[in-house]
Image (cartoon, helix red, strand yellow):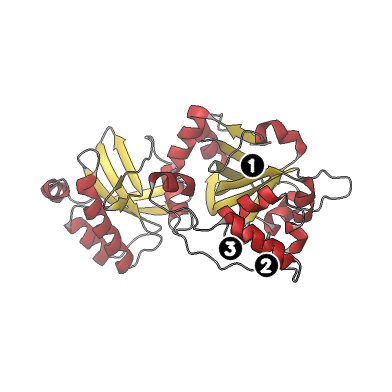
Amino acid sequence: MRVLVCPAYGSKESRRHWHDTPEKEVPFTEAALAGRLDPRHLEQLVRLHPAGAARFWGATATHDKAMAKVRTGDVALFTGKKRLLAVGEVGAVFANSAFADALWPPAPGGKSWRTVYSLRDFVPADLPYEVLAELIGYSKTYGFPGQLVLEGGRAQAVVERLGVTTRTVLEQLGVEEPPALDPAAVTQQLELERQHTATVSFERVTATTLYRREEQPLVIEFCATLSVPARRFRSSAGLCDIYLEGPDGVEVIEAKGRTGHAYVREALSQLLDYAPHSPLPVDRLAVLVPGPVDERELSLLHRYGVDCIHRTAPGAFHRAPAPDHVRRRMRELWTAD
């Protein structure tokens, strides 16, 4: 897996492009766009985005050599305003200046964005440059002036520290099914409908993705604060949010995007379901939420020996630990066969 670091909000032109494409989906099956696509690229887009619409970003010819390495399933980090703005998963990648110019008309005397890539998933994030630079292994003062393609161990370390799991990986694990669509049939349908209408409509397919879960930005932000890699494990109980093996033992964490009773109770039940399937015996369980919970919810978690971790500020979190004697007593139940 590679990690593509993309400056996305610097110049006035790039800010306009940002609002035009990543922030909203573009219907690529409309005649004005579809007519500029090579059939094989259209087929790939339809296969990855069966709804006929996708978010897009791109790069100028200056980056052709680096972009030639990028593949479906790679992770894209979008930077700007001295922050990591969003995390995405690369979908279709191809060189097509005509299509790029239709998406992002170049300014007078400006450069075309020759390489285009769609985004299978896209989620906002909020990390300062110094934190992102540290994750990559650069100086904290690094300003991310240009595009980067990270590979190997460096890329893997960033993905683990950010807690990113791509849809492509989920499909490979069998957790999620690839889009159920015959691209050849859709392409044929597109060619037929082009003769009668300017726009082709596809039924939107419902898919379960991790990037579109509302708690994913919270997970990304929390994992960036950790000193050990954040992993996940899959079992018959499902796919946990965060699995940690550190000097203080093994911890499983479930994240929720809200602090209401129903969300906390759901996280608790998931943790109790995941724990017996952990690769190693669990020492701690915790629920991660975006803000403080009421005393009722905190008491519920502590009754079962589960900690509560909540966000206090960007990149800052507070842990309310369960009483040690309760955790020790409950640990036997967490690890029971």
Residue 6 is labelled as 1
Number of numbered discs present? 3
Whole-percent x, y for residue 54 in the image: 62, 57
Q: Is residue 14 left or right of residue 160?
A: right
Q: From mark 2 to mark 3, how far is it between C-alphas?
A: 10 Å
Viewer-closest of 28 and 127:
28
Are the residues tagged 1 and 2 within 8 Å (C-beta)? no
Q: From mark 1 to mark 2, how far is it between C-alphas?
A: 31 Å
Report which quarter residue 298 is drawn in: bottom left
> Which residue is depicted at the point 66% across and 34% down?
68
Whole-percent x, y for residue 333 in the image: 13, 50
Q: Earlier in the sequence, mark 3 or mark 1?
A: 1
Q: Earlier in the sequence, mark 2 or mark 3?
A: 3
Are the residues tagged 3 and 1 within 8 Å (C-beta)? no
Q: Give the residue pinned by disc 3.
A: 51
Viewer-closest of 199 and 114:
199
Residue 21 visible in this rendered orientation of the protein: yes
Q: Looking at the picture, which amino acid does disc 2 mark?
A: Val
Q: Residues within 10 Å of mark 3 (few under 14, many from 20)?
A: some
Q: Looking at the picture, which amino acid does disc 1 mark?
A: Cys
Mark 3 secondary-structure assignment: loop
Whole-percent x, y for residue 27 in the image: 67, 62
Q: From mark 3 to mark 1, how far is it between C-alphas?
A: 26 Å
Mark 1 secondary-structure assignment: strand
Q: Is residue 179 left or right of residue 61?
A: left
Q: Looking at the picture, which amino acid does disc 3 mark?
A: Ala
Q: Give the residue pinned by disc 2.
A: 200
Whole-percent x, y for residue 263 in the image: 33, 64
Residue 103, placed above or below residue 324: below
